[in-house]
Amino acid sequence: MRQTDCLSFVQSYYNNGLIFFEPQVLSQNSIDGKAIGEFPILYYITASLYHLFGQHEFILRLLNILLVSFGFYYLFKLLMIVYSNLVYALGFTFLFFSSTILIYYTNNFLPDAGALGLTLMGWYFYYIYFVERDKTRSFVISVSFFTLASLIKVTYGLNLAAALLSLLIIEIIVNKAKKFKKLVPYILAFLVSITIISGWYIYVIHYNEANSVDSFLTTISPIWDLKTSHIFNVWDYVSNYWYTKYYYESTLHAFGLIIICGFFFIKYGNRTILLFSATTTLGGIIYAILFFSQFSAHDYYFIALIPAIIFLVIGSFSSIYFRFPKVMNNIFVKIALFILVILSLNYAKEKITDRYNDVNDSLAKIGMQLNNSQDFIKSIGIESDAKVIVIHDLTPNGSLYFMNRRGWTFKDTSSIALEKLSNNIIAEANYIVITDSLYTGCMRVNELTGDKIGSYNGAVFYTIKK
């Protein structure tokens, strides 16, 4: 569902002019379709490129792929610094990337994967700043990446907080604040970043309230707001359904084993990486608590936990690696790692293939039905500025995106679903589309349908009887 929301932002930018601070979607549930979620820089860039190269969905996919690719490239560079070993640097880079959910959304439209890529770049430059403290340039670059990632997806702001906490721990606890005065410019940089992020999301809340938007989450959904039965239900989804989509099960077992073993040899580990693992893990726990209810229905919420998993694993492995260098450099250990990488990537490939071939995906059916329908819609006289009512679409923007028309969608013809079908909507709408003949018998719908003007893949188009 959220995939077509993202594409709807792009399409609206393209249709209505590139006015950055007035993002819209095709759904007219808000005032003039004005709505906003995350910082729309990726949608704005995509719409701008549409004007140069034409309307191609792969442009937004490509932006996400590039961000994730650069993110994991810098993760590889970080691992090379930590281990000075090409095999382990490559092996762990591909192992962390082999998440089914991450790969799926890397090749799609949600900003979560792109935000992860920016976050990983931020952590690389922050590590460079930590080990070479005179590298102010690295610090500025890292905070810039953290800021942009947090703007694109606010939950990644926990990495910015983890970075600040890491700095304070080093200076106040380890160095006893001997150089605290020198930290003032760096702390100010964090405050500027937090101010920018906070300012943007204050604008988001104000913009959505002013335009009566209720379809984008702009608040937390914490565990303490849930009933006990709901908490167990979410945990059941995570542990028995989503669990196998996060990573190959043997990969998760390997991660767990590394973390447990590394704990016993923690004094041999890379201290900076171990510090990052502690602060990102704390951030991950806070994030999971604040957005707990979302984990049952939205698999992509897991992606924000990947930085914590990465630092936990590479920090723990550094403890083992430097405690038992001869064992870790044994050829059979390295071969075992690459076998696991191959199995994990193959597992992800199979799961992603299953996703794309899932004919029972109820949210995707509307896209398959109305794909490539725009020429037909023009041929039956539906103008580009016409507004349509779509009966039977489980998404707010799916059918509207594939038709490239503004309007309203209703999931069925029940009284609950149609309670928003007000006289104001009927007055504004020009056409009604019934995507399933099952709903043609509804009295309320029959009152609205005028002349039949065409049909496409089982979807029937009518004028609206005023």
Image: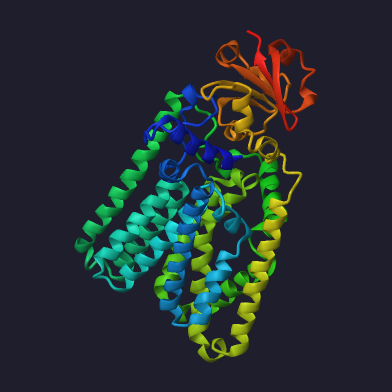
Question: Is 270 placed above or below 288 here?
Answer: below
* Residue drawn at 66 percent across, 35 percent down: 370
In the foreground, 235 or 401: 401
The location of residue 262, given as percent across then percent down, is 54, 76
Quarter holding residue 118: bottom left
Q: Residue 25, percent across and down? A: 50, 32
61 and 141: which one is in front? Answer: 61
Residue 53, percent from left and from top: 45, 46
| Horizontal side of residue 168 vs 314, given as left or right | left
Residue, x 67% and y 57% (percent of image)?
352
Residue 334 x/y as whole percent: 59, 84
Above or below, 381 against 206 in this view is above
Is residue 263 among what the camera can see? Answer: no
Residue at left offset 57%, top offset 43%: 3
Report the quarter where the C terminus lies: top right
**Residue most toward the bottom?**
326
On screen, residue 134 versus residue 345, left or right, reads left
Q: How is the image coloured?
A: rainbow
Residue beneath the point at 48% across and 65% down: 72
Residue furthest front as drawn: 379
In the rendered image, the residue lying farthest to the left is 181
